[in-house]
């Protein structure tokens, strides 16, 4: 099976490219709103590129495409920006080594040090997935001891709290924003033809990266507050998938279905 079966020009030559978060954004909204966005993408593959920019790992992403009917992306910025990869024609996520070298160097194989240092830390429960260049925890805000932030900084790494329920430990200076910009530059996509979409604080660096962006209507309040006054960000009224189409129309990035 060729997941990119339809004929299409190089992504840099298309009218626009959507770089979107998944949970709450591309996966947000009603069934009808998602169907509308996904159907529009499939009908316009020759002029619309698709990149997933997510905290999810590649295995989850491919499972969603295979089993849940999501449009297949052509590239993935996954694991909160620590994976930069191409989606091959046979449906596999293949890291782009040239773009990940700096990420690996910044991480320095510190996963075990992070797990030992934060073992038993109040309010943090280690997630079972073995990520390559990050360590992630479920966060209980009622029990969380904020000293974890200092302990991460002492290791020369960054921390990120999103949706008040996830705590990610990342390589210094690595997140969704720097990684999507690195990929856009690598692919030669004109910046004005990109639309970044998100809804939580782990999307902040992407939405304030200077690329055209949309905070969908169901975005968490802290994200909206941090983006207040950012001239490159459109604040949608509609939620999730409908908010993405609303922004595409409002910013005149591409023709959209009537009513979007």
Image (spheres, rainbow, N blue to C red):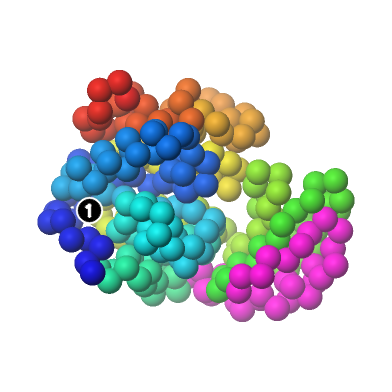
Please tell me whether residue 20 is drawn above or below residue 153 in the rendered image: above
Q: Who's the residue at 44% across and 70% down the image?
A: 100
The answer to whether one can see residue 213 in this image is: no
Left or right: 157 as drawn, with respect to 218? right
Name the image quarter holding residue 122: bottom right
Q: How many marks?
A: 1
Name the image quarter holding residue 228: top right
Residue on which the image places disc 1: 11
Is 245 inside the magenta-drawn segment?
A: no
| Nearer to the camera, 69 or 57 | 69
Q: Who's the residue at 51% across and 28% down the image?
A: 217
Q: Who's the residue at 41% across and 63% down the image?
A: 62
The residue stretch that appears in magenta:
102-130
Q: Who's the residue at 45% across and 74% down the image?
A: 101
Q: Position of residue 106 (x, y in %)?
A: 57, 70
Q: Secondary structure at mark 1?
A: helix
The answer to whether one can see residue 109 in this image is: yes
Is 125 inside the magenta-drawn segment?
A: yes
Q: Residues within 10 Å of mark 1 (few under 14, many from 20)?
A: many
């Amino acid at each position: 099976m060729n997941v990119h079966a339809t004929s299409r020009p190089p992504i840099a030559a298309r009218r626009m490219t959507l770089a979107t978060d998944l949970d709450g954004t591309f996966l947000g909204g009603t069934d009808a709103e998602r169907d509308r966005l996904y159907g529009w993408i499939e009908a316009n593959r020759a002029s619309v590129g698709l990149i997933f920019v997510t905290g999810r790992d590649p295995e989850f992403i491919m499972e969603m495409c295979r089993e849940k009917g999501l449009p297949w992306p052509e590239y993935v910025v996954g694991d909160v920006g620590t994976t930069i990869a191409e989606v091959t024609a046979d449906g596999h996520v293949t890291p782009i080594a040239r773009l990940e070298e700096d990420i690996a160097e910044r991480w320095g194989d510190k996963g075990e040090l992070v797990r030992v240092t934060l073992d038993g830390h109040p309010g943090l429960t280690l997630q079972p997935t073995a990520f390559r260049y990050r360590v992630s925890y479920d966060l209980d805000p009622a029990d969380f001891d904020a000293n974890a932030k200092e302990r991460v900084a002492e290791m020369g790494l960054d921390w990120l709290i999103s949706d008040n329920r996830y705590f990610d430990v990342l390589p210094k200076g690595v997140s969704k924003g720097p990684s999507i910009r690195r990929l856009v530059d690598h692919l030669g996509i004109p910046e004005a033809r990109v639309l970044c979409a998100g809804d939580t604080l782990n999307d902040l660096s992407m939405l304030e990266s200077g690329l055209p962006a949309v905070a969908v209507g169901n975005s968490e309040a802290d994200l909206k507050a941090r983006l207040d006054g950012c001239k490159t960000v459109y604040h949608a009224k509609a939620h999730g998938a409908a908010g993405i189409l609303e922004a595409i129309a409002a910013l005149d990035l591409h023709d959209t279905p009537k009513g979007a």
